[in-house]
Image (cartoon, grey):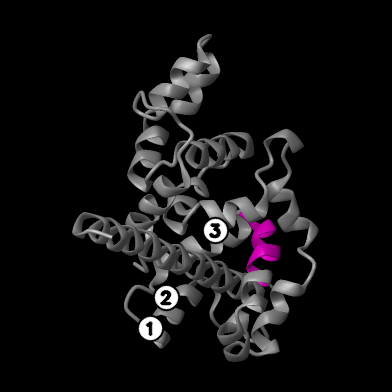
Amino acid sequence: MDFEALVKHISTIQSTLQAQAAHAVNLALTARNWLMGCYIVEFEQNGEDRAAYGEQLLKKLEQRLNVKGLNERRFREFRRLYLVYPQLKEPIAQYILAGSEIRHTLSAEFTDPIRHTVSAELQSVNNQPSEWNTQADRLFERLPYSHLKFISKIENPVKRAFYEMEAIRGCWSARELERQINSLYYERSGLSKNKEALSALGCNGKPCRCSPKTLLTRLLRWSSWD
């Protein structure tokens, strides 16, 4: 092995393992936010003293916790994440139960809610044609919270699924995803007779199918707890 080979090996190890670490952070971030949303909804529906907080619940929660990054606006986002994506229950439950450190830290008291059957009310949020359903494990593994945060704001379930699949297929960054939503990419693709051209446009004219290496590189930029 010469010096150039050494540089290549070190560079590959650095980029690959750092990206894998970023991916692990993204999974933990999505799980954290979904679980917080789960508990907020659970309290709003069944909390023993929920009437004492009413509409001030999230503000009171922010004040009591006093943790940077956990504020009323974020709690609303987490609640929306849970309500829009109840199907994430299964991959998140598997993720928590598979991690020994997480499993031992979170007692059954904390993990029980995600074992429960999602109510019919929540299931109706995801009531969309089967051909547009994005697999829950694929959502969890391939779309970081930064992406789910934008997509969960979309009320139309078919439109939402469209952006889920396009973001995964095109390896869009969060900024690219936001730009496509704001430019009405879904509406334009539905009206256009040349969907292949619009699909290419969505990836800035480049092939949409990213390699595992590209995906890992993108994950480095996606990782954030803010």
| Residue drawn at the location 65% of the way across and 55% of the way down | 137
Mark 2 closeness class: few <14, some 14–19, many ≥20 residues within 10 Å: some
Q: Is residue 43 visible?
A: no
On screen, residue 95 versus residue 215, left or right, reads right
Q: Disc 1 marks which residue? A: 63
Pointers 2 and 1 in contact (C-beta within 8 Å):
yes
Residue 104 position within the rendered picture, expressed as x and y whole percent measured from the top left: 61, 90
Which residue type does callout 3 highlight?
Answer: Arg
User: Any magenta on residue 60?
Assistant: no
Which SS class for mark 1? helix
Mark 3 closeness class: few <14, some 14–19, many ≥20 residues within 10 Å: some
* Number of the front mark, 1 or 3: 3
- Span shown in magenta: 85-93
Q: Disc 3 marks which residue? A: 80
| Residue drawn at the location 42% of the way across and 66% of the way down | 74
Q: Which mark is residue 165?
A: none
Dominant secondary structure of the magenta stretch?
helix
**Between 7 and 18, which is closer to the camera in this rendering?**
7
Mark 1 closeness class: few <14, some 14–19, many ≥20 residues within 10 Å: few
Which SS class for mark 2? helix
Which residue type does callout 2 highlight?
Answer: Lys
Above or below for 101 versus 54: below
Residue 45 position within the rendered picture, expressed as x and y whole percent measured from the top left: 68, 72
* Number of the front mark, 3 or 2: 3
Q: Which mark is residue 59?
A: 2
The quadrant holding residue 100 is: bottom right
On screen, residue 200 versus residue 50, left or right, reads left
Quadrant location of the N terminus in the rendered image = bottom left
**Between 102 and 32, which is closer to the camera in this rendering?**
102
Q: CA distance from mark 3 to mark 2?
A: 16 Å
Which residue type does callout 1 highlight?
Answer: Gln
